[in-house]
Image (cartoon, rainbow, N blue to C red):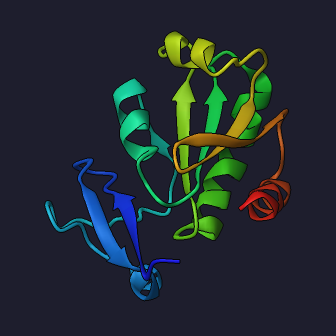
Amino acid sequence: MSDAVHIVCPHCQGVNRVPRARLGENPGCGKCHKPLFTGKPLELDEKGLAQHLKSDLPVVVDFWAPWCGPCKMMAPAFAQAAVQLEPQARLVKINTEQNQQIAMRHGIRSIPTLVMFRRGQEHARISGAMDAQGLSSWVRQNM
C-alpha cells in the first residue's frame, strides 16, 4: 500500500497527493491552500462527482431529493457522520431532482440511497434512512 493518497479538494477540485500519515493533520490543498476536509458533506453535480471519484478515499454518496421526507430526516445524521468519518472517507450529496442523469446512470430507484465508491467503482449500496451511528457503522464495515 502506498504511503500517499490522492484527495480531491472540495473547493477547487484539484487533486492532491497527501502522505497517509498527514491525513489527521487537516492538510491543505496545494493549489488553493484551503483545507481538504470540511467536516461536512459536499453538494456535488455530475462534474464534481466524476472528479471526486478520482480520490483514493472511499466516497459515500447520499442520493436524495428535496421533496423526500426520509431524506430530510436523514440529512442531519449524514452531516454528523461526515464529521465522524473524515478523513477516512468523503461524504457527498447528489440532489436527484437536479441531477437526474446521475441517478439514472447509477440505477437509483428509491431515495434515500447511499452508494459507496472505492477507486471510482461502486463498492456497496443501501437504501433507506439511517441515523448517524448506523450510517457510520455501515461505512466502516464497507471500507
On the image, the x and y values in percent for residue 76 come to 67, 48
Q: Nearer the viewer, residue 56 or 23?
A: 56
On the image, the x and y values in percent for residue 23 come to 44, 79
Q: Quadrant of residue 16?
A: bottom left
Horizontal relation, residue 117 to residue 142: left or right: left
Q: How many marks?
A: 0
**Residue occupying the point 76% across, 61% down:** 136
Q: Quadrant of residue 95?
A: top right
Which quadrant, please, contains the C terminus?
Answer: bottom right
On the image, the x and y values in percent for residue 54 come to 41, 48
* Residue positioned most to the front: 1
Location of residue 143 with respect to 78 vertically, above or below: below
On the image, the x and y values in percent for residue 7 come to 38, 61
Q: Nearer the viewer, residue 135 or 58?
A: 58
**Residue occupying the point 47% across, 14% down:** 98
Location of residue 3 with respect to 94 vertically, above or below: below
Horizontal relation, residue 128 to residue 31: left or right: right
* Residue positioned most to the left: 31
Horizontal relation, residue 39 to residue 124: left or right: left
**Residue occupying the point 74% across, 29% down:** 112
Q: Nearer the viewer, residue 12 or 18?
A: 18
Horizontal relation, residue 142 to residue 57: left or right: right
Location of residue 120 with respect to 31 vertically, above or below: above
